[in-house]
Structure formats: structure tokens, C-alpha cells
Amino acid sequence: MTVLNVNEKAYEIDASKDMPLLWALRDLLGLTGTKFGCGVAQCGACTVHLDGEAVRSCVTKIERAVGKRITTIEGLSPDSDHPLQKAWIEFDVPQCGYCQSGQIMSAAVLLRENPTPTDQDIDDAMAGNICRCGTYLRIRAAIHQAAKMQREGKKS
Amino acid sequence: MNRRNFIQSGALFAGGLLISFKIPTAKKMAALGEAKAGVPFSPNAFLNIGTDNSITVVLSHVEMGQGIWTTLPMLIAEELDVSLDQITVKHGGADKIFDHTLYGVQITGGSSTTWSEFDRYRNAGATARTLLTQAASKRSGIPIQDCKTENGTVTAGERKFTYGELAADAALLPVPENIPLRNKADWKYIGKSIKRLDAKVKTNGEAIFGMDIQFPGLLTAIVVHPPVFGGKVKSFNDSNSKAVSGVRQVVKIPTGIAIIADHYYAAQQGKKALQVIWESSSNAGLSTIKQTAAYKKLAATNGQTVQEKGDAGAGLLKSVKTLKAEYVFPYLAHAPMEPLNCTVKLEKDSCEIWTGTQIPTTDQAAAAKILGLAPEKIKINVPFLGGGFGRRATPTSDFVSEAVHIAKACGKPVKLVWSREDDIRGGFYRPFVVHNVTTGLDQNGMPTAWKHNIVGQSIMKGAANVLGELKTPIDDTSVEGVKGSPYLTSIPDHFVGLHTTKELIPVLWFRSVGYTHTAYVMETMMDELAHNAGSDPVEYRRGFFKEHPRHLAALDLVAEKGNWKEALPAGRFKGVAVAESFGSYVASIAEVSISNGQVKVHKIDCAIDCGLAVNPEGVKAQVESGIIFGLTMALYGEISIKDGKVQQNNFYDYKIGRIHESPEINVYIVDSDDKMGGVGECSVPPTAPAIANAIFAATGKRVYNLPLMNHQLLAKK
Ligand code: FES
Ligand code: FES
């Protein structure tokens, strides 16, 4: 038995230590917000946080995640009220929506580490996330907006 | 449209609870009567109003990113007098009721949802409002003209009823006819930018896609497909696969070998361990190099006549100068973000399917045939689609059929999941196409003769079960955009021909279909002609648009907003293109620079005339999306074949444009009362040619084959 700590809950799973975290989350724990897009660290749809760092869960073996805090889109905020989630809605970012969990999880790390990202910072942080619907410009705008919300929220 | 056709009945349900429209048969009525009080019974109407004040809009079309989850409810809300936050939205399943108002089959495609449902959904809302008002009038004794609807309520004199309170009464009233629809001046929602109703669930992990279907006992299947199209299994050894922990079964199916396991990872391990010997396929000799040579040879000869005027051959002989060009376009994979998948649960004499599909009834028929069941025994549930772009509208129902075969073979509920490699290598591509064009010019550089031959596979020949048999030997999807081009009609001697080829590689409609290549050819060719004539490319095109006001309006708007006439800073270059597709008119200006042999696209200005823009922000989002799609196609799109095998595998060698490659995009909507056209696909066609024309401005060289990554570009000194 392996214990995974996901979104502040401990789960016991029975799986080989080589299993990618993506499939443990999706197929064993039923947390389907994290998406499968390529399986080879090319698209970012599967992005989750391990102790606050963005990782591609499709190439992260569960043994690497043991003992770490795993955060998925379902655990990003208590009421879908992370500034990024609010900004995503305000800017009509999602189209098909399939890539957006991964986009938001990547952006969340950027925003934590860099409260005032430039376009270049955003491009650098987000270049690993593909959106086949081409929502990139809205993603960029929404990250700026979320950064602003975050700064203003902290002031008050 | 005859409104009688779609509103056949109001209906009373157990407990007298729901209004619904378009309930097709008495038999269904009886079945619906068993529905539980207050619970929406069966998704076969456009609108349900529950006694609990729930308002459910049921979509005839599916949401795959294009925003129809928002636009169709807007149409209902406009007439029903409810706010959008009162509405719950869901997909209809497979049902004749949801047949396309024009195409006569249930399909989401052709950029047609909004215009084709504009009347039907408004009528559904207006009918409900009228019935509810009548019910309020009866209840209160206040004359109908003094009853006012607002925000899900009817005010009748002193009394105010919620729609839920009136739903049961309204359901008993006869359905009125010829209800007038709201005037444009009174619209509250239509024409306003409304935020997406599906945005929240798509930002918190709640949105359910086909891939996310789970229930106890559901197994996951992966299929080992032949390495060459048309390949067949000769023999296989599954003992190592079956030894993998979690693998349950290995079964042979018509399209390969399926590994069925507890979860994806086990299935993937089982797939790696499988040993298969394939029979050689007649396709094993195919290569892109050979195909290019063969198609070019064909393109140099006249194909079957698509369009002809005068005598193109004689016209060319008479002309002062001729310009020739040969264009090559590769196969393209749609690569929707959500890999293809389908969940099947078989019962003794029925079957339930969950899959993201653009053609539910077609898939239903395919499943029924495989199972030997009547189509109505197959229930199709459609979750959100993680992108479609045409790939989820396969006339052969390829992945749905495959999943049904697996479920049948293994006898357990199963979810088929294609890997990204399966998707990239699995065929159903935008066809490989070659164009050969010769234009003859007069002393002013104006075209007086035009000979144009196109070579490629037919998409529609494989789609007869969905859209009917072709009525002529010409598949319009191979030639649309050349056929009927406003440039050609004015040329006295012209000929357009088509050679339809046959290959084992399956082809399919791909976002903007034939226009993906025809707009490129026409718009780069016109640019060449303009430069040859020493004319400004916008002005040169304008000369052809005297009788094409919508082309002209889009072109003029983008030229104005995109400052066409203004010079760019050193090192920046621009190009223009304009194309009609799916009833809309789109013109784009691309601004580029060249470095390290590659193009960088800095900006795209784009103007669209789609007639009424029901949700302008939604239109803008789709135009942006199409531009990025067109950019990816131009820069990277290529599926190539060697020894019968697809050379690409995954996103590392089938590249998709990323955020740092995305240009600034400005979208301008032509203020237009003209006939409504499509949106979802229409900004794709002009994107690649606008970029190519800008590349010409930068390098002095024409690009005659895509993608651009295969070219070493050099800026003019
Ligand atoms: S699924 Fe992990 S990066 Fe694509
Ligand atoms: S919203 Fe569809 S892939 Fe990003």
C-alpha cells in the first residue's frame, strides 16, 4: 500500500511505484480534473503541484510523490475562487476547456513566485502548456488580471 | 421553417410538472409519463421548465469549445424572459428531434449551429412564454395582454407567479402557432457579449469530458493498431501482456488487438508487452515523396470539370504573360486536446455509450449495427468534447465502433482510450492535396485566363451515410473556395478541374475543410498577380469585389483598422488575404519578421462579416481560436508517410503553436444585417496566406508548399 497526500487528504492506494501520478489520480482516486493529453510531458494538461512545484503528472512516478503534498485543480482553492479561476471566467478563457486545468496549475506557480509577471515571464512559464483551441491571448490577459487581483487582495 | 414541425405538443407529466416541446410520438409520451415528478425525464426537448422553477435548455448541438453552450441558451432566454443564470444547460443525446434544421441529420459541424438554430431556439422560448402567460391569465382572470413576463415570472395584476408555479397548467394548454418573435430593438441578450456559461466548471475540474466517465466495474482498453493503414493481424502472443498486473483480457478486434485492464497504466504496460506479427499491407509502399510526384503529374493534366468558362487553353496562348505555380499541402491531423475515447456498457438487449461526438445518431446507428440491436436501444450520452475540429464527426464512427467491438468481445463495461500516438497516427486527416495553376495576364497585369487543377482524395465519398451520396463526380469539399471564387468569375477564359484519388489513408473534414488549401492557393496567387502588376495587394483585390460587397466590407475594415497603408518599422512586413467560407467573409493582415530562417508572426488583424453576431465576444474568441489554428497549420502542420507508416507520433514531432508563438490578434466585426454565416472555422482560411504573403514581402520568395518550418527563409537585404 502506498499513501498519497492529495488536496490535504491521505489516500491509500494499491499500485506499482512506477505508475504515473496522472493515472493514480484519475483512475484510482477518481480525480478527473487532471487531464491526459500526451503522456510524454509535451502538453501540460496533466500539470499538478508537488509541494507547490508544477510537475507533469504523466511522467511523475508515484514513488516521487509519496510524502509530498499533491495539489490538483480540485484542491487549488476552496470555492473555485483562486484569482486565476476568477480571471479565467472574467476573460472567457476556456473554450473546449480540456487544457485549462493544466494551464491554471502552471499559472498558479508563476503567480506565487512572480506577483508582477511580464508578457515574457508568462510566455516562459506557460510555453509547456498546449491549448489546441488557441486561447493563449486570453490566458495571458487573465494571468495579468489575476496578478492584479492578487496584489489588490493582499493590500486590503 | 414551419413551426408546426417542431412544436408538436405541450405535455403533462406524472404530477403535471413539465412543459416540453417536440415530443415526437405517442409512444414516447407514454414513456415520458413514467418520469419522476420534477426530474427532467429524457433529453429530447429543447426546453424544460420544472415546478421547482428549474429551466433546462437542451442542446441539439454539442459544445466542443465553440461556445454553443452559451449561445443557444441566449436565444431561449431572449424570448422566455429569464436571466441566463436561471438556466441549466445540457446536451441532448442521439435523437432525430435534434436533427440539423438544414442538413437533416444530427451534426455539429460546418460552422452552422448559431444560424441554423436561430429561429428554432427563439421559437422554443417564445412558445413557452406564451403558454406560461396564458396559464397566468387563466389563473388570475386578468386578460392576457395585461400579463407581463419578467425574469422567470408572470405578473398578472396584483399577483405574481413564478414559471414553476405555472408550468403544470401551461403544459395542459394547446400549443399556439405563429408566435411573433421579439424585434431586434428589444433584444436584451442577442447581439450583446455574454460570458460563457461553461467557464466555471472548466476552471475547477468539474467539467466532465468523455475521458472522465467512470463508474464501478468500468475497465480501460487500449488498442494496438497496425503500423500501416490497412494492415491486418497475422498472429499475436499475449502471454506477457496477460502477466501484467491489472490486465484482464486481450482480444482481437477488426482494427487490431485490444488490451483490457483495470486502468490506463496497466493497459499501457500490457500493450508494451504484446507481440504482434502483422500481414503486409498493400499500402506499405506509400510515401509522401512518391505521392507528391504522382499527384504533381496528375495536376499537370486536366481533371474532371468543376467550373469552366470560355477556353482556358486558348486564353493562355493569347495572354501577354503567364504565371505558373504548383502547390503541395500535406495530410493534417486534427489533434484535439482530449484524445479520442468512448465508453460502452452493454446490457442484455441494450447498450449505453458515453462519448464526445459531433454526430450522435450516426454513432448510434454504427453501434446498433455491430450489436444487432435497433438504434433506439442504444443510448448515447454526450459529455463535453475536448475539441473536435471535425475529428469527432467520423462517418465510419471509427473509435465508437472500435469501443463497441471491444465491449462485445470482452463482455464488460469498457472505456476505450486512444493515446496521443493513436490519434496522430490514426488517420482521418485533412487530405494531401496538390494544385497546379497557370494564369494568363494582359498588358495591365490583369488575369484573362486561368487554368487550375486540383488533386486529392474525396472526403464526402466516405460520408455518404451522414450527408448522402454525392450527386456529381465533384466533391465540393475538394474545390470549395476555388469553385465560385469571386476572382475567377470575372476571368473570361478559365477552367477548374479535379482529379479525385484513392488511398488507404482515411481522410476527413478538418476545421475549414477545403478552404484550408484553396484559400491559400487563391490568396497567394492573387498576391503574386498584384505584385506582378505593380499594384497594392489590397487595391488589386478590391478591383474584383465590385459585385462582392461582403468580401469588400471585410477587406476594407481590416485595411482601415490594421493601418494597411502605413509603413512598418524596418524588419517588419505585412501580407493580406481574404476568404469567404461557411457563409462568412473574413479578411486578415499578418505582420511578420524573419530571423534564423524562420518566420515570426507578430500581429494578425482580422475582420469578419458573419451577419448578425449573436454573441460578439464569442465571435471574437472563435476568430482568435481559428487564427491560432491556422498559424499552427502554416508553421508546423504536416503528417508525412514513409514505407506506408506515418512519420509523426506526438506533440514533439507534430507541433502545435504555443503561447510564445501567438501573435497579437485584433478582431473587428463588420456591422452587418446580411445573412448569418458561420464563425468557428472562418478565420482559419485567410491566416496562412496572409502570413505567406507577408513572407513574400519580407523575402521576395513565394512559399508553394506548407508547412513553413520546412523552408529556410531569408529576408531581403
Ligand atoms: S499529459 Fe502530461 S504533459 Fe501531456
Ligand atoms: S480550451 Fe481547448 S485545448 Fe485549451
Image (tube, grey):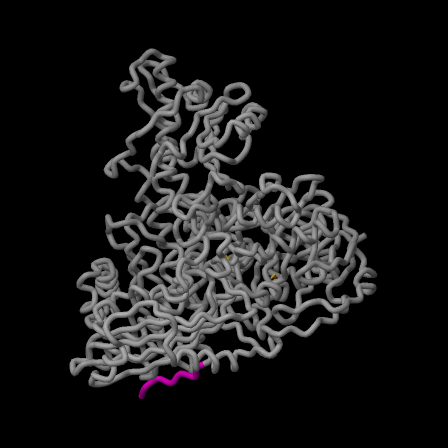
Residue drawn where x is 43% and y is 35% of the image: B85
**A2 above or below B6?**
below
Percent across and percent down for residue A62 are 72, 59
Q: Nearer the viewer, residue B651 or A8?
A: B651
What segment carries the magenta color?
A: B711-717
**B368 above or below B248?**
above
Left or right position of B21 against B446 = right
Q: Is residue B712 magenta?
A: yes
Residue drawn where x is 23% and y is 82% of the image: B532
**B363 above or below B432?**
above
Can residue B637 be seen by looking at this rendering? no
Left or right position of B82 against B344 = left
Residue drawn where x is 35% and y is 73% of the image: B521
Percent across and percent down for residue A112 are 53, 57
Q: Residue furthest top?
A: B141
**B281 above or below B345?**
below
Q: Splitting the image into four quadrants, where does ligand 1 fall?
A: bottom right
Left or right position of B294 against B619 = right
Percent across and percent down for residue B320 are 20, 85
Percent across and percent down for residue B357 are 53, 50
Quadrant location of the C terminus of chain B?
Answer: bottom left
Q: Is residue B462 magenta?
A: no
Q: Could you say which quadrant of the image residue A16 lies in?
A: bottom right
Q: Nearer the viewer, residue B441 or A64?
A: B441
Q: Nearer the viewer, residue B188 or A139?
A: B188
Can residue A63 be seen by looking at this rendering? yes
